[in-house]
Image (spheres, rainbow, N blue to C red):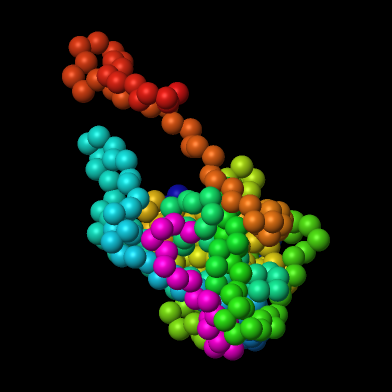
């Protein structure tokens, strides 16, 4: 009896082993259907790298460096106030990660002697120019020439301002390469690659950051979100897709909220940029509309029943 049981066990074991060997020899269709195809070859990487370099070189022809001289006392007295959350505190404005540093910034050449920049660079809003803290604006062209500039218009709704080179001093104007606007908004997809080309601390050097489109239809469909590392130097820089098409401009970036190079950045859609440019060419100064504000504060006393009691109401709010 024992011999029969032993023989059956041996036969069963051999059958399992044969089946396992046959299964190993068969192609696993289900596994292969979901398996990652593998990393691209170095040849593909080199091709992408060469394309990015050529793209940055092309866009840099239309990107300038913008330096703004501030009255430091005025700037210091108008630091942005960040409302704290009771029990939570707020960002430490002495931390360089949160502090909004002074340029240089990037600008985009969009017309004869016309440079678009981020409106945040100009300080508090004024209906006839920059804030009182701004003493001078200097634009460094790609060829190294430095030109004074004045504010021609401001559009705070999408955080843009228009500069005009002051050609009176030299009695002539430079010939600038103009990056033309597309005929319509370039449709973007989440995950699509984009490249930001600006000017860094060295105005003759190019600052390149690439990333992907993180989200669409931000700021009431005026902007899209990207994860490129944005700092002060790339505020106002053009954003292009991998085809070299102008899709947006870096604006609407609140460093006090997101911090420097946080990977959370906004860019205005290019058709919004063009509409704002047409308005600012006419000398228009468009202020940011008031933000929604409820203006209700809770009673600081510990509640003796469910819910919170209203402690105060800010006049004119709601």
| 228 left or right, relative to 112 | left
Pinpoint residue 2: horizontal percent, then vertical percent: 42, 52
Q: Is 230 above or below relative to 53?
A: above
Question: Furthest residue to the top?
Answer: 305
**What residue do we see at 53% from left, 44% from top?**
288
Queried whether the magenta region covers residue 180, the answer comes back as: no
Image vertical order of residue 103 relative to residue 125, above or below: below
Image location of residue 187, percent across then percent down: 73, 56
Please tell me which residue lies in front, 109 or 22.
109
Instruction: Please name the residue shown 65% across and 70% down the image.
Output: 114
Identify the image quadrant of residue 278. bottom right
Q: Nearer the viewer, residue 101 or 307?
A: 101
Q: Name the residue nearer the viewer: 32 or 62.
A: 62
Which region shows up in magenta? 130-148
Residue 293 in picture, x, y percent from top left: 44, 31
Quadrant (top left, top right, bottom left, bottom right) of the C terminus: top left
What residue is rendered at 28% in x and 40% in y? Answer: 84
- Which residue extends farthest right? 183
User: Is residue 48 visible in the rendered structure shown here?
Assistant: no
Q: Describe residue 17's horizontal placement relative to residue 69 as left or right.
A: right
- Residue at 47% from the left image edge and 65% from the top image edge: 230
Image quadrant assignment for residue 134: bottom left
Residue 153 is at least partly visible in this image: yes
**Residue 196 quadrant:** bottom right
Tag count in the figure?
0
Give the side of residue 34 with respect to residue 6, left or right. Answer: right
Q: Determine if the magenta segment contains residue 143.
A: yes
Residue 225 lies, with reference to residue 88, above or below; the image says: below
Q: Nearer the viewer, residue 24 or 37?
A: 37
Position in image of residue 73 (x %, y %): 28, 61
């Amino acid at each position: 009896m024992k011999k029969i049981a032993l023989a059956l066990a041996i036969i069963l074991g051999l059958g399992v082993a044969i089946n396992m060997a046959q299964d190993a020899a068969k192609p696993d269709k289900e596994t292969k259907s979901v398996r990652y195809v593998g990393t691209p070859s170095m040849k593909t990487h080199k091709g992408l790298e060469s394309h990015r370099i050529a793209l940055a070189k092309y866009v840099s022809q239309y990107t300038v460096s913008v330096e703004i001289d501030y009255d430091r006392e005025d700037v210091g007295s108008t630091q942005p106030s960040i409302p704290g959350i009771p029990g939570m505190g707020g960002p430490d404005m002495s931390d360089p990660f949160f502090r909004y540093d002074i340029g240089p910034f990037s600008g985009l050449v969009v017309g004869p002697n016309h440079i678009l920049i981020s409106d945040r660079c100009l300080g508090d809003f004024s209906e006839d120019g920059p804030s009182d803290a701004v003493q001078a604006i200097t634009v460094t062209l790609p060829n190294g020439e430095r030109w004074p500039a004045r504010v021609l218009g401001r559009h705070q709704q999408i955080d843009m301002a228009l500069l005009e080179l002051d050609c009176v001093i030299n009695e002539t104007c430079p010939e600038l390469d103009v990056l033309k606007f597309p005929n319509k908004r370039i449709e973007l997809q989440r995950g699509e690659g984009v490249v930001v080309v600006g000017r860094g601390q060295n105005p003759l050097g190019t600052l390149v950051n690439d990333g992907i489109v993180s989200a669409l239809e931000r700021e009431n469909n005026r902007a899209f979100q990207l994860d490129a590392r944005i700092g002060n130097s790339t505020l106002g820089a053009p954003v292009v897709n991998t085809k070299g098409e102008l899709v947006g401009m870096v604006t609407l970036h609140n460093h006090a909220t997101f911090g420097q190079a946080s990977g959370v950045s906004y860019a205005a859609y290019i058709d919004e940029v063009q509409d704002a440019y047409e308005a600012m060419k006419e000398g228009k100064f468009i202020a940011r509309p008031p933000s929604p504000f409820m203006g209700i504060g809770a009673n600081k006393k510990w509640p003796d029943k469910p819910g919170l009691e209203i402690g105060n109401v800010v006049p004119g709010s709601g």
